[in-house]
Image (cartoon, rainbow, N blue to C red):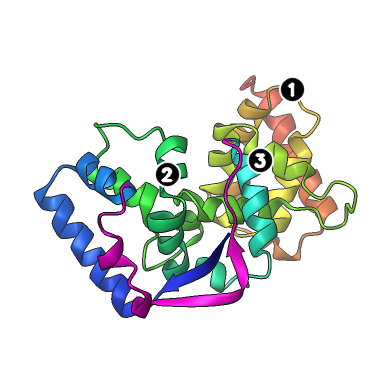
């Protein structure tokens, strides 16, 4: 297994400059092909440009299932602090080097890939945010588990993580709303609420909008889990009353 590495900041800036120049002058799919073949490795990942975490490893993914990949990654790197887990030096190394073949397969990359999608799939912005974290191909696996793991359930801590990763639309509706996804309490509450519901995808799509609008006006950090459950139930009843579902 490969040790977790980060790219020194100065080297990362140079990599981004190179990628921008290359994508401006050449075909995006050609860049991905060369990246996957390792043609940029000497330039991007010279050892003098890297720093190694001694006690962490990037595990190989033995499944194409996103939840299984996310669980594997998280269990091997759970000692990362939240600050380390928003480090662009870390996730850019993971995407451009360690997991580029996985990304190619998972994202179904083809000849029509755009420059914007190259950045979205294979890079992690130098200025991180909850949205950046949820969009990047690899960091979203780690953070998806981190925000949904139920550490109070010793027998099945990944119960709600499985729900989060079970459907791309559910994952998107929760994780790409930064005010929700930045809080494990809100993320878990959403997942617990839809756990036994039919039409989970439709409910999540609607109720996440209600919740997002609410937390833009109210400080929900002081809410208990029961308060949030009651709030979600009120939103759901309103959705039913209005015939939205």
Q: Range of the magenta residues?
A: 37-64
Residue 201 visible (yes or no): yes
Secondary element under disc 1, as helix, strand or loop, is loop
Residue 143 or residue 26, whichever sits in front: 26
- Please identify, in this view, whether the residue under mark 2 or under mark 1 is nearer the observer: 2
Secondary element under disc 3, as helix, strand or loop, is helix
Label 3 Cα neighbours within 10 Å, binned few <14 / some 14-19 / many ≥20: many
Q: Is residue 230 left or right of residue 42?
A: right
Between discs 2 and 3, the one toward the N terminus: 2
Corner quadrant of residue 160: top right
Q: Kindly check if marks 2 and 1 are in contact, taking CB atoms under 8 A apart as contact.
A: no
Label 1 Cα neighbours within 10 Å, binned few <14 / some 14-19 / many ≥20: few
Corner quadrant of residue 142: bottom right
Residue 134 or residue 230, whichever sits in front: 134
- Please identify, in this view, whether the residue under mark 2 or under mark 3 is nearer the observer: 2
User: Which numbered dot is residue 198?
Assistant: 1
- Magenta highlight on residue 48: yes
Residue 202, horizontal then vertical, whole percent: 61, 26
The residue pinned by badge 3 equals 164
């Amino acid at each position: 297994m490969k040790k977790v590495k980060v790219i020194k900041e100065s080297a990362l800036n140079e990599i981004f400059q190179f990628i921008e120049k290359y994508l401006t002058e050449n075909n995006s799919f050609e860049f991905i092909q060369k990246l996957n073949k390792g043609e940029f490795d000497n330039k991007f990942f010279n050892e003098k440009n890297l720093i190694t975490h001694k006690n962490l490893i990037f595990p190989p993914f033995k499944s194409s299932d996103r939840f299984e990949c996310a669980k594997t990654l998280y269990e091997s790197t759970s000692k990362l602090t939240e600050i380390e887990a928003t480090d662009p030096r870390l996730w850019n190394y993971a995407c451009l080097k360690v997991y580029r073949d996985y990304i190619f397969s998972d994202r179904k990359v083809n000849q029509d890939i755009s420059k914007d999608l190259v950045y979205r799939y294979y890079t992690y912005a130098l200025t991180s945010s909850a949205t950046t974290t949820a969009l990047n191909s690899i960091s979203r696996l780690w953070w998806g588990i981190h925000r949904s793991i139920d550490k109070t359930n010793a027998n099945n801590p990944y119960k709600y993580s499985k729900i989060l990763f079970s459907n791309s639309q559910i994952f998107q509706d929760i994780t790409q709303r930064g005010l929700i996804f930045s809080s494990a309490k809100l993320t878990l509450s959403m997942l617990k609420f839809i756990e036994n519901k039919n039409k989970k995808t439709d409910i999540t799509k609607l109720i996440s909008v209600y919740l997002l609008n609410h937390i833009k006006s109210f400080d929900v950090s002081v809410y208990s889990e029961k308060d949030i459950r009651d709030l979600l139930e009120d939103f759901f009843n309103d959705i039913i009353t209005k015939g939205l579902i």
